[in-house]
Image (tube, helix red, strand yellow):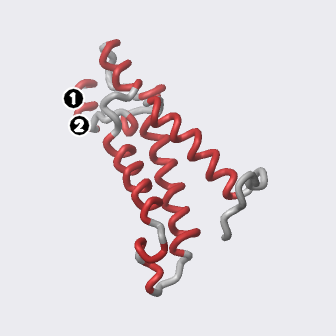
Amino acid sequence: MRPRPAGHAAPVASQVWFGGLIELAGGVAVLLGAATRPAALLCSGTMAMAYLQFHWKFHLDSGFWPTVNKGELALLYCFVFLHLACQGGVLAVCQIANKTLQQAPTGCFGLGWPWTGWSVLHGLLIVS
């Protein structure tokens, strides 16, 4: 896929348009710390698909390596967002709200334990 000239937008509802929308909304959510883990997981998957489809292109030749196909940033963002999805942010709005309100680990916006940073064991110890 060739890069578009400056000033030309991607067609509405195309794969590139949806990718840009996910990156914008997910990036803002991660930056603000609101629903950090789900947003980071979605952004990580988007970056993985960007690498696979636009850099690697599913060829098993020397173009597999990120330094050859210029996909270093896509892979870097993929793993950074994956780390945020697994570990969460210390300064996330959800974490601060849960600590200040002294709530049980219900999660960010009621999403449950995978999105909070609480382990299943910790949740079972609090409930029982």
Instruction: Estimate the spatial distance between the alpha carbons at disc 2 and disc 1, rounded to whole Å.
Output: 6 Å
Which picture quadrant has residue 94? top left
For the point 44% across and 77% down, the residue is 68
Q: Residue 37's x, y, as percent?
A: 42, 39
- Disc 1 crowd rating (10 Å Cα; few below 14, some 14-19, many 20+) is few
- Element type at mark 2: helix
**The C terminus sits in image quarter:** top left
**The N terminus sits in image quarter:** bottom right
On residue 81, the disc is none
Q: Is residue 50 left or right of residue 100?
A: right
Residue 22 or residue 116, whichever sits in front = 22
Q: Is residue 9 left or right of residue 40?
A: right
Q: Residue 92's x, y, as percent?
A: 38, 29
> What kind of residue is marked 2?
Leu
Which picture quadrant has residue 64? bottom left
The answer to whether residue 64 is above or below residue 77 is below
On residue 125, the disc is 1
Query: Are circles 2 and 1 on residues that touch, CB within 8 Å?
Result: yes
Residue 52 or residue 123, whichever sits in front = 52
Q: Residue 35's x, y, as percent?
A: 47, 33
Identify the residue under disc 2: 121
For the point 67% across and 69% down, the residue is 2
- Disc 2 crowd rating (10 Å Cα; few below 14, some 14-19, many 20+) is few
Q: Residue furthest top?
A: 101
For the point 34% across and 28% down, the residue is 91
The answer to whether residue 91 is above or below residue 17 is above
